[in-house]
Image: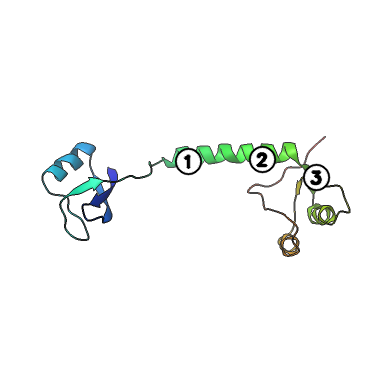
Amino acid sequence: MIRYSLRCANGHDFDGWFRSSESYEAQRAGGQITCTECGEQRVEKSLMAPSVPARAGRARAAQAMAKLRDHVEKNSDYVGADFAEKARAIHEGREPERAIHGEARLDEARKLAEDGVPVLPLPFAARAKTH
């Protein structure tokens, strides 16, 4: 089945499902496709985003996540459970400015954000560096 975004001559947008592109063309030529809002028979396909299979989307998301993890680990220091303390110290100028990552409890992260310390949650668990 193919889903098309359709638009009638009066500017109404709606979706239609067809067995194939040939089926769509045959139904359109035969006046069998009408606007769901006004009944207009002059209907054309409108622009629509391509459909990406779920498997391909998951694979791209996994690749992006791995790339992000690699970037974070290569460009910041892992501070483990001391993250909240280190982030606050860097923000307040008590430690040299540098990029860090680690773990923080939810209440610690919330307090940092409330106090204006620029932190972001990462969409993956940190791995300790072993060197």
Estimate the spatial distance between the alpha carbons at disc 3 and disc 2, rounded to whole Å. 17 Å
Q: Secondary structure at mark 3?
A: loop
Are discs 1 and 3 less than 8 Å apart at CB?
A: no
The vertical placement of 89 against 74, above or below, is below
Which residue is depicted at the point 71% across and 54% down?
119
Residue type indicated by callout 2? Arg
Estimate the spatial distance between the alpha carbons at disc 2 and disc 1, rounded to whole Å. 18 Å
Residue 7 on image: x %, y %: 25, 51
Indicate which label's residue lies in the foreground, 3 or 2: 3
Residue type indicated by callout 1? Gly
Q: Residues within 10 Å of mark 2 (few under 14, many from 20)?
A: some
Which residue is depicted at the point 23% across and 46% down?
44
Residue 41 falls left or right of residue 127: left
Of marks 1 and 3, which one's residue comes earlier in the chain?
A: 1
Where is the C terminus found, in terms of image quarters? top right
Residue 118 on image: x %, y %: 73, 55
Q: Secondary structure at mark 1?
A: helix
Q: Which residue is mark 1?
A: 57
Are discs 2 and 1 less than 8 Å apart at CB?
A: no
Q: Which residue is mark 3?
A: 98
> Which residue of the protein is positioned furthest toward the front in this rendering?
10
Of marks 2 and 1, which one's residue comes earlier in the chain?
A: 1
Residue type indicated by callout 3? Arg
